[in-house]
Image: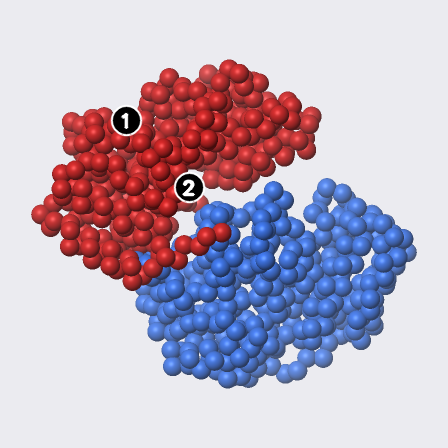
Amino acid sequence: MNAPQPDLARRKGSVDMAHGGGGRAMAELISDLFQRHLSNPILDQGNDAALLNVPPGRLVMSTDGHVISPLFFPGGDIGSLAVHGTLNDVATAGARPLYLTAGFILEEGFPLADLERIVVSMALAARDAGVPIVTGDTKVVEKGKGDGVFITTTGLGVVPEGVHVSVERARPGQAILLSGSIGDHGVAILSKRENLEFETEIRSDSAALHTLVANMVADVPGIAVLRDPTRGGLAATLNEIARTAGVGMHLDETRIPVKRDVAAACELLGLDPLYVANEGKLICLCEADDAERLLAVMKAHPLGRDAAIIGTVTEDDAHLVEMETEIGGLRVVDWLSGEQLPRIC
Amino acid sequence: MKYVDEFRDRELAKTVAEAIRREARPERTYNIMEFCGGHTHAIFRYGVKDLMPENVRFVHGPGCPVCVLPVRRLDDAVEIAERHGVILCTYGDMMRVPGTKQRSLIRAKADGADIRMVYSTLDALKIARDNPDREVVFFAIGFETTTPPTAVAIRQAEKEGLRNFSVFCNHVLTPSAISHILQSPEVRELGTVRIDGFLGPSHVSSVIGSEPYEYFAEEFGKPVVIAGFEPLDVMQSALMLIRQINEGRHEVENEYTRVVTREGNLKAQSLVSEVFELRTSFEWRGLGTVPYSALKIREAHAAFDAERRFEVSEKKSREVKSCECPAILRGVKKPTDCKLFGTVCTPDTPMGSCMVSSEGACAAYWTYGRHRDPVRRPRAKEEAA
Ligand code: SF4
């Protein structure tokens, strides 16, 4: 990894309209900053479109725009998040991610030093994941028309033979597994939000899940559903699955891992961790007979250490997600109404 | 921060539930009004109802500050924001409450008014400091619990000489609202609402103490148990009420001894009375005009009183016609008795205040409990009749 060059920031100060103008300033920004940090053979060819070698199989493609505030938070920033988010969308289709692309919308006046931090973080995330960013785009908008930086990433991957992960495959009787504690990302973001700073050690769980997924599908190729519960949290994702597949769900609250700090922060802010965003967790539905074996596979991976079986898929015409509460009562876990937190990711 | 596992213990809950089942006499019903929305929320969020025998019923009271604010006051807030061009700061839930013609603060914001969501009075002060050339108004709502922070904010603004900060005060008082309910015809004469005892709001009592309830426990012959907000607090308090009812007692008991004393927080009380005084009357949504049930800012702090600072027009404020919030807030009806519940009115499209806050009875029914109380969807015939 090349070390970020601090004099770039000193020389250029901040993004200005010329950086999007197609002239020398733009060429310099691209070569000095994007190309330098994200360098790989395909990107370095410098073509407008990347020429890719793709193994045989079913292709998966996913794109995601990233708009967050604040841009830097404990455990990550918009750069690494943009990489992880898209890798996870590809991975939860059961696929092995191969390539990424990135589009930047920069606001006039955004400090180049911060931009460099973000690009370095993207480069590291992509490198750690072993998935190169092969092409990209940069645009500059006038001051006041953006929020610092917006990043759109697209990911391409291939599904291994024999794997058919799809939400419609949810069936009554299947087990619901969760790869770890919920709410970490949302609380980490909140803890740095203006006006809301509170003391917590919680870091975002932002992480690329594809190696965990690879282990899971290798051992239990019959996995029915994989999803990452990002915005709207566990509750929204489970409701989406229930509605799409026409099933119900029964959860056990005592089995859903929530870190103490996260629980305490949620308590303080009047939030329900079930609705708080995650960026490095996944939900998995599989046949009940496979559940224990799959759980062991997940627990053996660093990102699945705290994995748990949290419930079962049920038959229910109303497609309700129900949960047995800590004290043994029953409640509905509904969709989020409105926004629990304004613009969390 | 102290964590609360011990008040959510499944085994303990079972034990308390068994005790309730043993002590609740099968030949009678126990109607327990939880005044406070925090209890409504806890009851639904944890499924406390499931653990109770059929004849122990919870009647939801008016104790959600968002729910009881009359439309008129909300319309006034919108007007202050729009006509006077101030920065209006408010707590999150308040943003979505529909005012006259469904106009909410969130709509006004979309139309260009500068309305900002804050998490505390300190945020509002900060906004005032950061915008010295703008007027900043804090839209203050809530019961006795949220009043001291508002008083602190006013004192702080005074100390700093913040001239662009003021408070639109809508703080209301719990004991007068409870008395009002007990004096209402539904309870006194018509018998349409049976209330055998009260779960007293614990956070309120952490400020005012348990003493203010002694008067009406005596006067109206209704037992009160000051109850914490954890599910086991609610269950244990229900058990204490059942015991009192069985024994024919009507006392104020305190389940929440870990926080609440008889006298409450004297320092907070004196701070509040230094900054605020009683209004002779105040309108509540659902309860109508209730004498001596709210606070206003004292003359000495008039400079920080948005009501004196910003004129509002005479206007006709109106709620959605078929919204049953007023009846629900008095415990006369259940959310599922409302024709709009779950059809036109959901948390995404609230028609009344009870569907907005997570402490509102309609929102709690919809979010947590609608599977057990099936939505009564009126058939076309009924509708026409
Ligand atoms: S369901 Fe909606 S319209 Fe009906 S009482 Fe509740 S808030 Fe009002």
Q: Quadrant of residue A252?
A: bottom left
Pointer 1 residue: B180
The red chain is B
**Residue ID for mark 2:** B357
Q: Relative to residue B109, is residue B253 drawn left or right?
A: left
Image location (x, y in percent) of residue A307: 48, 72
Instruction: Name the element at disc 2.
Output: loop
The answer, for residue B374, to whether it is visible in the render is: no
A336 relative to B120, above or below? below
> Which numbered dot is residue B259?
none
Most foreground residue, B8 or A239: B8
Residue A201 in the image, given as x and y percentages of width and height = 59, 58
What is the x, y in percent for residue B80?
A: 55, 24
Query: As drawn, is B37 to the left or to the right of A269?
Result: left
Q: Which residue: 28% across, 26% down?
A: B180
Quadrant of the rendered structure where residue A62 is? bottom right
CA–CA distance in space, label 1 to label 2: 23 Å
Crowding around mark 1 (Cα neighbors within 10 Å: few <14, some 14 to 19, many 20+) is some
Quadrant (top left, top right, bottom left, bottom right) of the N terminus of chain A: bottom right
Identify the subunit bearing mark 2: B
Task: Name the residue located 29 percent from the left edge and 59 percent from the top edge.
Answer: B12
Counting residues from the start of the chain, the first of labels 1 and 2 encountered is 1
Q: Which chain is blue?
A: A
Q: Amino acid at mark 2?
A: Ser
User: Which residue lies at the image location 43% right of the left edge and 60% below the top edge?
Assistant: A239
Q: Is residue B214 left or right of residue B5?
A: left
Count the marks: how many? 2
For label 2, the crowd category at 10 Å Cα-Cα, with few meaning under 14, some 14 to 19 and many 20 or more, is many
